[in-house]
Amino acid sequence: MLSEADLALVNALQVQPRASWSLIGKALGVGPVTVARHWGQLVERREAWLTAYPGAAVGEGLVFAFVQVDCAPGEAMRVARTVAGDPHLAAVDYVAGPCDLVLHLVASDLATASRYVVDRLAGLPGVVGTRTLVAPRMYTEGSRWQVRALSRDQRGLLTAAEPSPGMSPRFGELDRALLLALGENARATHTELASRLGVGASTVRRHLGAALAGGVIRLRCEIARSLSPAPVTMLLWLRVPPDQLERSARTLGGLPEVRMCAAISGAANLLVGVWLRGPGEAVGLESEMVAKLSRSEIVDRAVTLRAVKLGGCLLDEEGRIEGRVPMDFWADV
């Protein structure tokens, strides 16, 4: 695992990814130069990184789906590495469960999602079957999960100057360009972003401030899965009564292990992603979930054997970042 100092720095950047090194250093009790050097070492060792992705405000205009892929014997990892370079896939997992791969697909509309599955995915050598579960609503997504290494006072210091959310601005071409640029360097200065995008720094400051405050763009800090306090990823397919779906999703979203919760099409109508300290924790968590949701049923489960892509970032066998794929969900297939 990472050290306590490493985890505290990661947690600080999960709370405020673009906070100044002076503010982060003040919260952690070290100087800004020290904390900046510390982060640089984590990045150099590929143990932690920042990324950017569309927030819920933009997500209402996007189509989310989870694609289960069956592969020919021995072909799963080759297929996973092939599709990991596609911009429409936010995540690619090789799993032990009802399929070989689970792909997190995001597209600008249902027709584009269909073209991806039919024209791009289904015809790949090694793919023998696919099942697509459209997610009409994403209740909980990855940015809420944190390593919880900060005290309440430290967290309060970081969030004291946090702007209050206003009305979500419209997502335009400049915001799309900002999103892609931040995906490469989430801490780029306004001047650096302005130079790249060919606009004024004041324009970048205004658009970025509104996009972050309004949830149009979200930033998150990730750590290598093998070094995480919760290195095991598990997916659970649940069937709950339709009139209990919203309440069930809110209840599950309150569990600290839950990384993702989405409504899905199919016999199971809720998909939950959890991060655990070990496989054995799944037994207790499932018991707690069923106890909280007395009319629910866990109909299937899968454990991630290898995360090939997460949040648009390519990962090696130990979960360290080894490349980035722009999360341009609006691109054509």
Image (cartoon, rainbow, N blue to C red):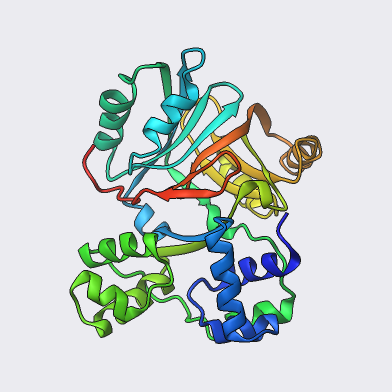
Q: Where is residue 317 in the image (x, y as percent from the top left)?
A: 57, 38
Residue in the image at 66% along x and 46% along y: 226
- Quadrant containing the N terminus is bottom right
View extreme (left): residue: 198
Q: How many numbered discs sit on the rendered protein?
A: 0
Name the residue: 56% across, 45% down.
261
222 or 211: which is nearer to us? 222
**207 over 314 or under it: above or below:** below
User: Depth check: 260 or 239 in front?
Assistant: 260
| Location of residue 47 with respect to 14 vertically, above or below | above
Q: In this view, does 304 lie to the left or right of 110?
A: right
Residue 159, image quadrant: bottom right
Q: Where is residue 3 in the image (x, y as percent from the top left)?
A: 74, 63
Whether residue 238 is visible to the viewer of this picture, yes or no, is no
Q: Is residue 286 above or below residue 229?
A: above
In the displayed structure, would residue 188 be above or below residue 23? Answer: above
- 261 and 125: which is toward the camera: 125
**Which quadrant of the structure image shows residue 131?**
top left
Q: Can residue 291 be seen in this view?
A: yes
Report the side of 158 relative to 54 (left or right): right
Q: Is residue 39 left or right of residue 227?
A: left
Image location of residue 101, percent across then percent down: 50, 27
In the rendered image, the quadrant that contains the C terminus is: top left
Q: Quadrant of residue 112?
A: top left
Q: Residue at x 52, y 50 (%)?
A: 139
Residue 309 percent coordinates (x, y): 48, 42
143 to the left or right of 198: right
